[in-house]
Amino acid sequence: MSDPIGERSVDEYAALTDAASRGRNNAFLQRAVDRHGSRARAIDEAKRFAALLDEFARRFGPDRRVCLYESPGRVNLMGMHIDHRGGIVNPVATQERVRAVCAARDDDLIRARSLSGGFGEGEFRIADRLPPRPLRSLGQWLDWTEREAVVTGGGRQFVNYFACGPLYAACFLYPPGRRFAGADFLFDSDLPPSSGLSSSSALVVLATEFFLRCNAEGVGGLPIEKLLEVYGYGEWYIGTRGGTGDQAAIKLCRRGALRPIVTTPEFSAREPAPIPDGYDVVLYQSGDAANKSVEPYKTGFNAPIISYQAAELLLTEFVEAHKPARFEALMARRASADARHQRVYLGDVAGHAILTESEIYQFLQTIPSVMRQDEIFRRFQRRAETFQAGIQQANEPEGGYHVRDVAAFGFGECARAENAGRMLASGDMDGFAQMLNVSQLGDRVTQVDQASSRRIKSPCDEDLRAMESEGLPIRGLAGDYHVSTANIDRMVAICLGCPEVLAARLSGAGLGGMLIVLGRQGFQQHLDPLLRRDYYEPLGRQLQKIPIVPSEGAGAY
């Protein structure tokens, strides 16, 4: 990878990108080839940035010193909904991305202007958004951001994504009273919002990186673990309560490969795993959109996370009682970690380091199928402030928290994610596809007719005992995370009816967005007519798709 070009005047960058857009070799074209792999793609990137620079010069003047940033979407091929549970995510970065011209300011105003119809314009002063008193814990950040999301509009206002990382950093990385430099952002994007590609996290990563660059004094070069904390927990500002897996994927993915990553409770990034030749991965737009920062999607997104947390506190008690030596060793390794990590995560047991698969089945039989909010309070009233605050601020879903089914999904998905890289390395795409389909069954919301599928989706005690006796691998357990949609379930059925398709499942956090389809090379010519006839045309929607080309993560030119 060539060295970054760094900060230049608008005119200097305009000259570089204009020449590169006409195929002339220079520093920008070389950097773009290194990041995107092909000269044709690099020239296309040069054209996009040349247009941005021209508009930036018109709006803000040609003499400003600027940096050029890009931040991609991500597609997690295996390891859905488990990045905050100690599980592995296996993402690729998309070619589609946010591109921005960024300039530091002398005051603390942050202005964001978009050339994309899906966003808009907005601005704020950092001093006006800071909490009235210093925050000293993640629990206090959670409590404050919950109230702020109501006041500022949360994820309904795109400019709030530019506040996420800067405000978290201001609260926890810098001393109180620090004066900050703001920034002007002019950006464009071919990354569709509300499509399960983490377009919001792409904005957060981009804005946060440039803010830290503008305010480098006192923070220096942050380690990747701290950066991911700023990205991920910063995004709570808009009202969601996710982990740091999406942001890690956006930052760390490499061209041509899937990147196995663990972000909780300790960060680790494994070697990239190239995707075998002869197969295509394509995203198809369902047309269902979900803004997870507003109701009813907010409850649908947050409820299974609370179910996860309840299950892990039960798991912690189980391991402490049945595997005391292993429990003590795990807690000793985390003695210096934040209090929220003083627990046994689902991902801790997925590799059989603490419990065998038989013992996981036995533990699941001890979990209540459903827990009400008041029951969770009584059971865990001495537990971490962060967990209690999170429950208090969430709307309880109708029927309570389905703790067992969510835990079953989590165990199964952690095991599937653990095996994903090895399967790709060995060329076992059929096995990989089978795991994808089991994973989608765990997200399915429509009725499941097959008895064998119902058994692994919502298992009763008898089912769990039978699966333990049969030796069904935990990776074959679907569980029920329940964040698909009826339309996405319908799309999955159509896709799996096409002989050239191997697997289909929703992309991203769910409740709408896009569908990941894995198939033999060229499968689209067989599948597209079926989807048009049986899905898009009856709903009056246009077929929209994005071929996935594993690409480089976020960074500067």
Image: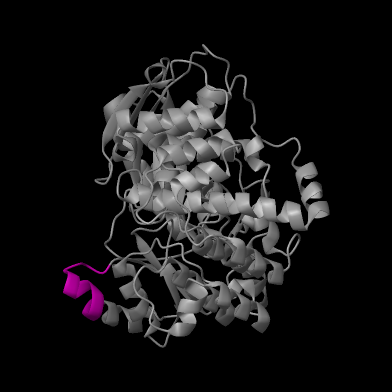
> In the rendered image, is residue 442 in sight?
yes
- In the depicted view, which residue is nearer to us: 509 or 226? 509
- Residue 56: percent from the left, percent from the top? 32, 32
- Residue 521: percent from the left, percent from the top? 46, 80
- In the depicted view, which residue is nearer to us: 162 or 452? 452
Main SS, magenta region, reads helix
| Residue at image location 39% in from the left, 38% down from the top | 239
Residue 222 location, quadrant = top right
The answer to whether 43 appears left or right of 6 in the picture is: left
- Residue 379: percent from the left, percent from the top? 57, 45
Above or below residue 232? Residue 406 is below
Residue 128 magenta-highlighted: no
- Residue 496: percent from the left, percent from the top? 40, 82
Q: What residue range appears in magenta?
A: 532-543
> In the rendered image, is residue 262 in sight?
no
- Residue lying at the far bottom of the rendered structure: 499
| Residue at image location 34% in from the left, 23% down from the top | 124
| Residue at image location 54% in from the left, 40% down from the top | 387
Number of labelled discs? 0
